[in-house]
Every structure is written in C-alpha cells, then in structure tokens.
Amino acid sequence: MTPNLKNLRADFPLLQQTTRGKPLIYLDNSATSQKPQSVIDALNCYYSNDNANIHRGVYELSERATREYENVRLAVKSFINAAHAHEIIFVPGTTAAINLVAQSFGRSQLKVLDEIIISTMEHHSNIVPWQLLAEQVGANLRVIPITDSGEIDLEAYEKLFNARTRIVAITHASNALGTINPIKKMIQIAHAHQVPVLVDGAQAFPHMPVDVQDLDCDFYAFSSHKAYGPTGLGVLYGKEKFLEKMPPYQGGGDMIESVSFTKTTYNKLPFKFEAGTPHIAGVIGFGAALAYMQKVGMENIARHEQALLAYATLKLLAIPGLKIIGTAEHKVGVISFVLDGVHPHDIGTILDDQGIAIRAGHHCAMPVMERFKIPATVRASFGVYNTEADIDALIAGLHEVQRLFN
Amino acid sequence: MSGLRELYQEVIIDHGRHPRNFGALPNANHTKEGFNPLCGDRLTLYIVEQNNVIEKIHFEGSGCAISVASASLMTEVLKNKTRAEAEVIFADFHQLIMHGHDKELEDRLGKLAVLAGVAEYPARVKCATLAWHTLKAAIADDPQPVSTE
C-alpha cells in the first residue's frame, strides 16, 4: 500500500518555512495540525467582513454571522452523521467537552459509591475530570487494563461492570500508543448493562470516518485544532435524550430563556450548553477545515495515513536498538518509540536540529508510561500532508542520533 | 563547532552515560528530590555538609544526557566547596547557560563550561538546571519537592 494522495503540502503555508536552516518536517500532528490556506482565509474573511455577535442582533451583519455559525453546526452534524443539529455543542475543546459531561451529567447522575470506567491508555484529559467528579460525589474510578501490545483487555473490561457502574469514558484512539479501540463493541457491552459511553475522539476524528449513530455512542468529544481547524474550539456530540435532561454546565448569556431573581429558565438545546459569546471565528474556520477534509475525503485520508504508518513502522524497526511502544493490530498514524541508550528528550533536540518536529515526553498519558515502565517516548504522528520523504528524513535523523551517541 | 555538536560533545555524552558520584549517601544530612514534569526527569541529591562545607555530594535518578551530565559535573565541582562558593558557582553557571559563551565566566567555571551550548536550545535550560535548583533547595532544607515548572 503506498500513499495515494497527491502531495498536499502546498495547501499549508506554514509548511513552506525552514527551521534551523532546514525545510520543516512536521510530525507532531497528534499535538496539533497545521492549517490549510482555506481555513486561514475563512478566519480572515470573517473578521474582515462578517464579524458581529450572533443570535441577538436585528441587523443584517449579525444575521449573516449567525447563519454562518449555524451552518457549521449543520456541517458537523452531517460530517459525523448525528441525528439532530442540536446534538452538536460547540465548546473550547475536547477537554472542555469531557469536563462538561463529567460535571453536568456526572454530578446530576452519580452518587456515593457509584462507578466510572476509564482505561489505562487515557489522556490526562479523560482521567482528571472523572477524578474530580469522583471526589465531589464520592464515586470510584475503575480502570480497564491494557495488554503488552497496548490494546484494551476486553475480558477484563466486561468484568468491571456491576450494578453501580454509571458511565464509561474511553478514547477512540490513543495519543500515546496509536491504538484504535474497538469502541463499537465496547459500547454494545456497556449498553447491555444500561451504561452510557463517552468517547474521546480527539485522536480519531481527524483520521478516519466517524459515524456516531453507527457507533451508537452517547457522547463523542473532539477538537478542531487537531483536524486542521483553529485552536480554542471543540465539539461535544451528545444524544438528545441525555442532553435534554442534563442541567446547564455554565451560566451566562445565550443559554437562558428568561432571567429574573426568582426564576431563570434555560434556553433549548444546543444553546443551553453554549453560555456567553462563543468562538464564532473559530467555528467558521472549522467549517472551512471540514470542507477541506471532505474535499480530500476521509476514506482517502485514512488510507494515506495507514500507508505512512506501515512504511514508517517497517523503516523504524530496521534501526538497531529501537523499540516501538504500542503494537496494536489497529492503529492511527501514531508511532511511539524508544531507542537504547538515548533519552527521548535528546532525540527530540537532535531531530529538531534537522528541521524535524516530533514529540518527546509522556504525552499527557503518565499511566501509559508507568504501564510500560518507561519515563518517556519519542512520538511521530502523521497528518494528511506528510509523505514517505518525511519518514525518510526521520530515519536519517535517527541515524544521526546514533552517530552522535556512539 | 555546530550548535548540536557542541551540545552533545564527548564530555557530556560520557557523563550522561557514566555519571560520577552516582548513588545514595546513607549519612547525608541534606536529601532532596527534583522533578522536571515536562520530560519526566527525576533526581535525588544527597549532601554531607560539615561546618558549611559540602564534604560529599551524590545523586541518583534518570533523565536525558543533558540533565544527568549536568548533575554529574555539578557533584564533581562542588565537592569541598562552601555554601557561599556553591551559590556563586550556580549564579555563574546560570548566567552562562542563559546567555551563552563568555570567556570570563567560562574561565571561572572550568569543566562546567562544556554546558555553554545549552544557551542555543532554550527548551533544554530546565534539563541543565534541574540538579542546581535541587541543590539550592537541599541546602536551604526547603520541605517542598523541587519542580522546574
């Protein structure tokens, strides 16, 4: 399988630069993605022509901004195949989406000794909000173990359920290991126990087609900035039946129907969860990012990145002393590895000197590092604009690391 | 010398791989842990201090070549130095790795001057100073663990 996309690098102005005198090779897409010109233009156009507050102006400008903002909600709805547009809530990011569910759904539904299931491979943002909730209501966290290859132990997962289980929060794809979890199956298992499931889709949404109705997940959270859109914006998808019953998370303007000092009534979905002026420009920019991904095609993006993953895995394994952490059968384009005798942080600096941006560290997944008994890994993660030549440069860079250290 | 060659010169790689004064000191009268949450580097510093003089200084822990080499070189340089001398050396060292080459400073710092190349890599300053910040807290007997963040 070879990458089937034409080289898209030219669409991304940032990638045209040199760093430390070398052409920039950007392999840190799990952290954030670069933006195509069309997204930058959409932001520019919004601020140059259409900027107004939404949902309340009686003038044409505000109506235009409102229309554009709401059109993106419709675009997200079709993109992930939600049943209703009002199931799409704009939030500041995946982290905010998870906190919203933990605080609104969690605090209203969970009681002392109730249980929350998460997994060992979660990003800190899908651990800490549940720990906070557990402390607030006296609930307990149950953690699904992972295997040596970095896959969910499904048998152990099933055994965690009992009459006190109230929610499962699981990542679709691991940012530290690359593992794509069998979430459809995990959701079926949870539903068989009448337990709803939140899926952290931050690392999956930009890399594969996502159909929330087919998955039958109850909540799905993802970020714009990892999917070629602006920072400071994310989406919480939630099934209407849950969102309707959940109390507001934050109070403020736009989320109310009427306010008096004796009684405030709340706005309908999705506005109940969008207090204050939202990131209007970000939403409009994200609309351009969705259009970009749609033009390339999510199936094509997935195929392209899978081909890069296969190519990089083969090339990396040929380097003596290199070990890949996370060898699941199904992975997104994320490769974590360690190299004998060289700390990941030193590898990061030496690669940076050659214009290659990778991540070195614990990737906000300290329990994963503990599971594999390592302090840190080097992580290369791919996006739509990466090519085999980028991977060849990474391999050459790693040879340079070994030359310096031997 | 290119920036990278300078950063990873032989002395640093050697100290990173074979740190000197490595291991616990059971009779230490100052013990302190340091942590760099950004990269996970951890070290514990052990000091035997008598009459204001650092008689013995050891460390243990794990980290990148820069942080281990910096800790190793620090223990070599500070042996038999007074507290006041150690503080002056830290001030000079900090100045060097923040601002880069300076003949006068490098002369005063001796073998520690091999870390001057860190100045070109601001993200690595924390690695090079972890042991030193830990030292400062150790001799002050600060009860809080040291974090570079």
Image (cartoon, rainbow, N blue to C red):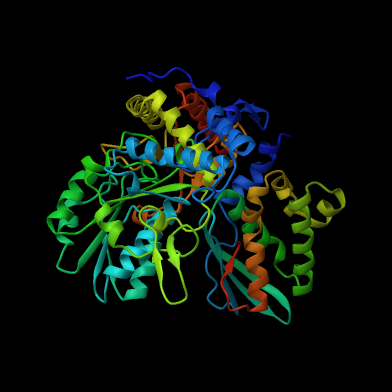
State how many labels appear. 0
Determine the residue located farthest toward the right in the rendered image: B104
Could you say which quadrant of the image residue A330 lies in?
A: top left
Closer to us: B76 or A295: A295
Q: Quadrant of the N terminus of chain A?
A: top left
Q: Residue at x 45, y 32 (%)?
A: A383
Does A281 sit above or below residue B55? above
Q: Look at the image and tell me whether residue A342 can be seen.
A: no
Quarter the C terminus of chain A occupies = top right
State the image coordinates of residue A145 (x, y, percent, origin top left): 25, 56
Query: Residue B25, how many percent across, how many down?
Result: 55, 72
Q: Could you tell me which residue is drawn at 47 percent across and 33 percent down?
A: A289
Q: Which of the two residues, A163 or A330, is positioned nearer the viewer here?
A: A163
- Residue A235, percent from left and from top: 40, 47
Q: Is residue B119 left or right of residue A402?
A: right
A173 or B145, which lies in front?
Answer: A173
- Residue A324, picture quadrant: top left
**Looking at the image, which residue sits at the far bottom?**
B51
Q: Is residue A134 above or below residue A360?
A: below
Q: Is residue A313 visible?
A: yes
x then y, percent, for residue B78: 71, 65
- Which sits in the foreground, A36 or A149? A36
Q: Residue furthest front?
A: A58
